[in-house]
Amino acid sequence: MAEQRRDQLFATPQKKTTRFVFDERVADVFADMIARSVPGYATIVQQCGELAARFVRSNSRCYDLGCSLGATTLSMAQNMPTQGTRIIAVDNAPAMIDHCKRILDEYRPNVSVSLVQGDICETAIENASMAALNFTLQFIAPEKRSSLLARIYHGLNSGGCLIVSEKIQVQPPELDVLMIELHHQFKRTQGYSDLEISQKRDAIENVLIPETLTTHLQRLSDVGFKSASVWFQCYNFCSIIAIK
Ligand code: GEK
């Protein structure tokens, strides 16, 4: 991938907590930030390619919802059939779209990609054989999550899959505490200082709203998915596959 800048956004003491936003400063370091912050991120992205090879049908669409720099898009593009297929990659942050466009121009995937700046809650989903919500649902207001999933369900073809990767709230609470500690230890191992970990945690509080696995699986069932299961988990980060 293009030159990766190191994430040092929270390395110096900040006088007051500023709410985390997906702006130019974040987009600039995002590849490094997510790789060093989300245990299992590279595995999940890579496996989305394997799942695309299995689930994506010719003459259908694939959706990367909250695409950021297009990592999932590129992984799907490298593995899915090319005949009559298209990936719709959507993000509402102009800085992410700008950087993603540059990366796609550089990598020139074999599959057509439509890069759309917009709200995934308003994106039309149709003729889809696969959709990915990789660490995006957690940024959508909880009261909007059911209608978004219902729209994705209706836009998927029968046999199509939805991948939902999320930071989760682990049950029971004492295990949630343990998982949060293990996650922070993971970040330390990745080179983040205690100051960076605590300032990032404060900035992202109430921006990223995690839910329990039970809530996610129940919601997927409620909107109509006939089967859904966790296929990957590391600490309090997991990925679910749901099949229509
Ligand atoms: C990856 N999937 O690399 N509409 C569109 N985009 C949104 C919305 C919304 N309503 N809300 C947030 N986003 C990527 C990583 S990052 C995860 C996804 C993270 C976008 C937001 O701009 C950001 O780019 C992305 O969702 C979440 O596999 O930062 O932890």
Image (cartoon, grey):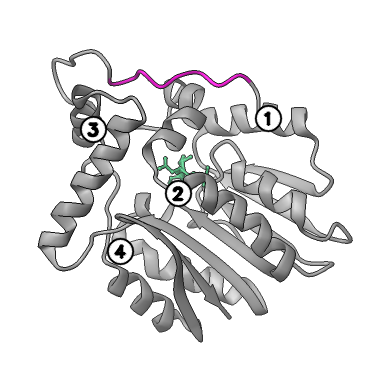
Q: Earlier in the sequence, mark 3 or mark 1?
A: 1
Q: Which residue is mark 1?
A: 103
Q: Is residue 200 left or right of residue 122?
A: left
Q: Is residue 75 left or right of residue 5?
A: right
Please provide percent x and percent y for residue 211.
Answer: 27, 62
Q: Amino acid at mark 4?
A: Glu
Please provide percent x and percent y for residue 120.
Answer: 51, 53
| Magenta stretch, residue numbers | 3-10
Q: Element at badge 2?
A: loop
Q: Earlier in the sequence, mark 2 or mark 3?
A: 2
Please provide percent x and percent y for residue 18.
Answer: 23, 26
Q: Amino acid at mark 1?
A: Ile
C-beta proximity under 8 Å, tags 4 and 2: no
Q: Earlier in the sequence, mark 4 or mark 2?
A: 2
Outermost residue toward the right in this view: 83
- Residue visible at 75% across and 46% down in the picture: 113
Q: Amino acid at mark 3?
A: Ala
Marks 2 and 1: which is nearer the front? 2
Marks 1 and 4: which is nearer the front? 1
Looking at the image, residue 75 lies above or below residue 244: above
Report how far apart the C-alphas of labels 1 and 4 lie in the structure. Answer: 33 Å
